[in-house]
Image (cartoon, rainbow, N blue to C red):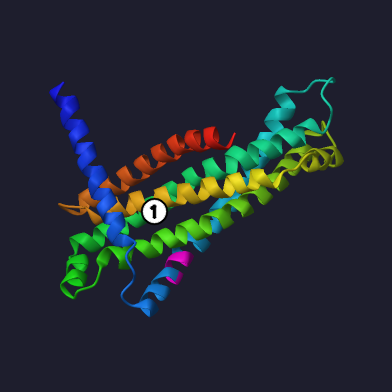
Amino acid sequence: MNTLTTRIKASLIELGSYILLMRDAFKKPQNSYLFRQKTLFEFKALGIDSIAIVLLISLFIGAAVVMQMLYNLENPLYPRWVFGFASRKAIILEFSPTVISLILAGKCASRIASEIGTQRLTEQIDALEVMGVNSASYLILPKIIACVCFFPILIIFSIAVALIGGGLGALMVGSITIFNYIEGLRLEFSSADVVYAIVKTAINAFLISSIASYRGYNVTGTTVDVGHQSTNAVVQSSIFIIIFNMIITKLFV
């Protein structure tokens, strides 16, 4: 019982510390020019540099989704377009916004936490604060803005490439024609599905960037602890992505 109480207390203290750090991070930047330059750099490091891995994974998993459906749901009673329709729903609603967010959590959260953690241990953050710079705003806010703005764009790319990959998977299996697949993709298409994917991704992007920044900002000890906090950043952001995925699904459905 004492152990449980201690853990709850520690969790509440961490939550309070996280909220206070985010409050400082969202304060108005002190130097607009440097802030814009820093934000553009983060767009490249966290967004543009992630395009290749997102497209590669999306292409092959999109193909795998359709192939699995064709292998396991083959039934003469099903209309041929149902596979394209079901694949579109699965890719837009769950695969791209959730699975790709988990991939980005592994790539970007570890980078953010290790970068800020190294700056903490090498006293770069202390130097900024001595000079009167709001280190939280300068280091964290550009990363959050870059992730929240660019990750939804990555998801749009992911959806498009995954649907193309699904068409390739359909051609490889040969059970349906590409015409049947495209017919299913177009059937009862709703823009609300894409809005749902974008909103979910933006929330996931905030979770990834803010949790990783918090972990890195509060590193203490040695360089080994930077690795530990990077791992914690990936694990915690992934857990919260899954939790918020359930919450958002309940709210939208």
Residue at the spot x=36%, y=40% of the render?
235
Height in image: 232 above or below 122?
Answer: above
Does 41 appear in magenta?
A: yes
Height in image: 87 above or below 52?
Answer: above
Taking the image as shown, residue 149 lies to the left or right of residue 27, namely: right
Q: Amino acid at mark 1?
A: Ser
The image quadrant where one finds the C terminus is top right
Taking the image as shown, residue 194 lies to the left or right of residue 200, namely: right
Taking the image as shown, residue 55 lies to the left or right of residue 170, namely: left
Q: Nearer the viewer, residue 106 or 196?
A: 196
- Neighbour tally class for label 1: few under 14, some 14-19, many 20 plus, Cα within 10 Å: many
Which picture quadrant has residue 30?
bottom left
The image quadrant where one finds the N terminus is top left
Q: How many marks?
A: 1
Residue 59 in view: no
Residue 79 in view: yes
Indicate the position of residue 173 as horizontal and vertical percent values.
Answer: 77, 33
Q: Nearer the viewer, residue 127 or 202?
A: 202
Which picture quadrant has residue 6?
top left
Residue furthest bottom as drawn: 33
Indicate the position of residue 137 as horizontal and vertical percent values.
Answer: 31, 65
Q: Nearer the viewer, residue 29 or 230?
A: 29
Height in image: 3 above or below 39?
Answer: above
Residue labelled with disc 1: 209
Taking the image as shown, residue 38 lies to the left or right of residue 133, namely: right
Q: Nearer the viewer, residue 140 or 54?
A: 140
Residue at the spot x=60%, y=50% of the render?
56
Does 112 appear in magenta?
A: no
Indicate the position of residue 212 as horizontal and vertical percent values.
Answer: 34, 51
Q: Which residues fall within the magenta stretch?
A: 40-44
Residue at the spot x=52%, y=55% of the render?
151
Q: Is the magenta region chiefly helix, strand or loop?
A: helix
